[in-house]
Image: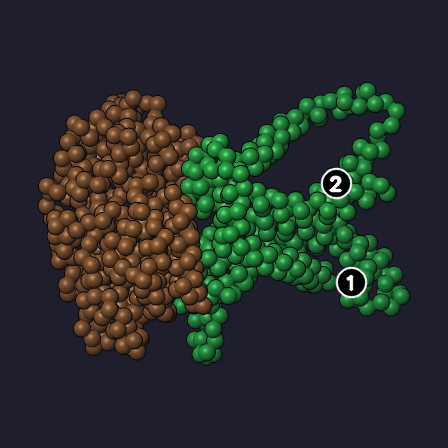
Amino acid sequence: MALSDATDATAQAGQGTPARKPTRIFKNLSSKIASLPMVFTALVIFVGGTVWTIVYSFTSSGLLPRLKWVGLDQYERLWSSRKWIVSIENLAIYGICSLILTLVIGFTLAALLDRKVRGEGVLRTIFLYPFALSFIVTGLVWQWILNPQLGLQNIIREMGWESFAFDPMNNSKIVMFGLLIAGLWQGTGLIMCIMLAGLRGIDEDIWKAARVDGIGTVKTYIRVIIPMMRPVFVTSLVLIGSGIVKLYDLVVAQTSGGPGISSQVPAMYVMTSMFGGQNLGQGFAASTMMLVTVVIILVPWAILEFGGKKRG
Amino acid sequence: MKLTTKLMAFSAIVSASSASAVELEVMHWWTSGGEAAAVGKFAEAWDASGNKWIDGAIAGGGDTARPIMVSRIIGGDPPAAFQFNHGRQAEELIEAGLLLDLTDVAEAEGWADIVNPPNLLDACTVDGRIYCAPVNIHSWQWMWLSNGAYEKAGLPVPTNWTEFSESAGALQDAGITPLAMGGQSWQQNGAFGVISVALAGTEAWLAVNRDKSVDAVMSDEYTRVFEAFGAARSLSEGLNVQDWNQATAAVINDTAGAQIMGDWAQGEFALAGEVAGEDYSCLPGLGEVGVLQTGGDAFYFPVVDDAEITAGQKELAAMLLSPPVQVSFNSAKGSLPVRGDVDLTTVNECTQKGLDLLAAGATLPAGETLLSPDTVTQLNDLMTEFWNTPSMTAAEVQSAYADIIADAD
């Protein structure tokens, strides 16, 4: 929603340009002055910090930053590191699964709640509640639930299914799915609420019209409702995407990157090399690569999404 | 009215006493039972001197705690004192002039004469100035064995690594995990270090860690080490724990046969009321090579802009090495004192073995004093991957290890 507001604002600004150009700067002067601190913060802290990080990623900075140039050495080492490759693969697995499943589960829950079920308020609270917890708490809770000696596996075995085995925390092949379950448990509630708000925004007449035309409920959702909810999906996508890129605290709390290095993620690689390994240069190189990846994905998408609208 | 006067008098007393006492915040990562008991001895002694110890314990081990400490120092909000493993971890902080020079304290207290082995003080020294106060000697070279577990399996307690490897099958048949290993990477790399000293010998170990010799990594002696470590992977199956003290707990309650862990594990045995020789046995150098690495913990003191705190920091540094504090702290922690002239109150069989090796001079410098934290992190990552990936072969790891040593500074 925030994004669609922003597009509206740029669209309006575009319309307001003609004729009186000189006075434009002084238009809404007080609100412009009020936003100066934020503009300053964004420029100095976000842009300035990013540039500083990129510059120092070409140095051999250890525990403290120092300008001793080493060219692309840090990047060469980064891409020859198995841990970094594993981190990237893990993030890709987690990202793709989390993106699809969060959207599907979130939308399905919202659609079910929207069918005027009894106790909607209670259910909505239950689904949204995990979002109120920090990732650290979520990670610890799921670490206990998935612990083979005291969690899920043990309970099901005690119920009689002796051979049942589900131990993702100690199996390097499926550990990412253990993290995914925890991530979904926490994240879907919020997406469900956003979707629900979107569904509530759909005019009742659309449903009536679909019923008159004899279109089934599921087909109406897929063909009519979902395309109408495009802005809601964009908002959800941005929220989920930013959650994926910054995935760190959940991993630290739940698996601390293990077993071995099988649940490492890029943000964790950055933290360990910067502080554990006292090698800032390597950490900066890794975080620069994270930024580059995000930019590569975001820029074409942003051009498609917002560039088109401006022309139209 | 009376109450008010009383309160005023009380607050006057409080403010008077707080004026002379120095409050020092001390950060450390000693949070397991034995460790917390030991650090309590420091706090007691410091509070008894009329000052105030503010405990800044950080759970999760050194890898979690060091970044927090470093970011507080760089960020301009340093604690009064913090624990590091002495060696190269604080190198850059010293070069940047962020840490207090303790040379005058060291000279006044005569540290150069009392600290034994002398390489502990060398690890604190940069360009002839002393920057840290070593408080204990810790050595990785130990294997702790549960006598109860071997009794259950009907076997004698092994006296070296070879016997241990041979007994592993029988332990597994008795439902006991032969080797307890925590999930954190430093534990797995540490155990590898112990096995390499024991099986490849001290010369090969020094060639790799001190001289950074790639040939030594690729030598036949080291091939044996990588193969032994690879074979040990299957011995820890069935016990999934993260922290080292949870692994030690498995040895204490006889569900695991043995653990390779530094002598700090002994604090846990003591806390559980176990007796060395009866309930558990210890093998320095895995019973193969009788030698100890003299690593350990040291306290560093950041430079602060307050003369009163600086004086307090120096007073604390002197106190940490004073004989009564050394005795009470090291007795509780299960480590060895840094001074050769004090006697520990509770010397058990295992501590005595350690003291004997120390007296005989059978020591090696600690890995942290030879390798930079950057290299240690890379080795941690490699060894934890090896330990947790059954399909990874010893030869693959050996060449990856050689690459890291070749790049080491």
- B114 with respect to A273 (left or right): left
Please give left or right for residue A237 compared with residue B11 in the image.
right
Q: How is the image coloured?
A: by chain
**Does residue A255 appear anywhere in the picture?**
no
Chain A is which colour? green
Against B1, residue A278 (above or below) is below
What chain is the brown one? B
Name the residue rendered at 40%, 63% in the picture. B395
Q: Mark 2 highlights which residue?
A: A5
Identify which residue is drawn at 67% across, 58% down. Answer: A103
- B96 or B178: nearer the eye? B96
Q: Quadrant of the C terminus of chain B?
A: top left
The residues bearing labels 2 and 1 have C-alpha atoms spaced at a distance of 25 Å
Q: Is residue B39 above or below residue A25?
A: below
In the image, residue B355 lies at what x, y percent?
14, 51
Q: State which quadrant residue B73 falls in.
A: top left
The quarter of the rendered structure image containing the N terminus of chain B is: top left
For this orientation, the residue located farthest to the front is B215
The kind of residue on which mark 1 rests is Ile
The location of residue A305, given as percent across then percent down, is: 76, 46
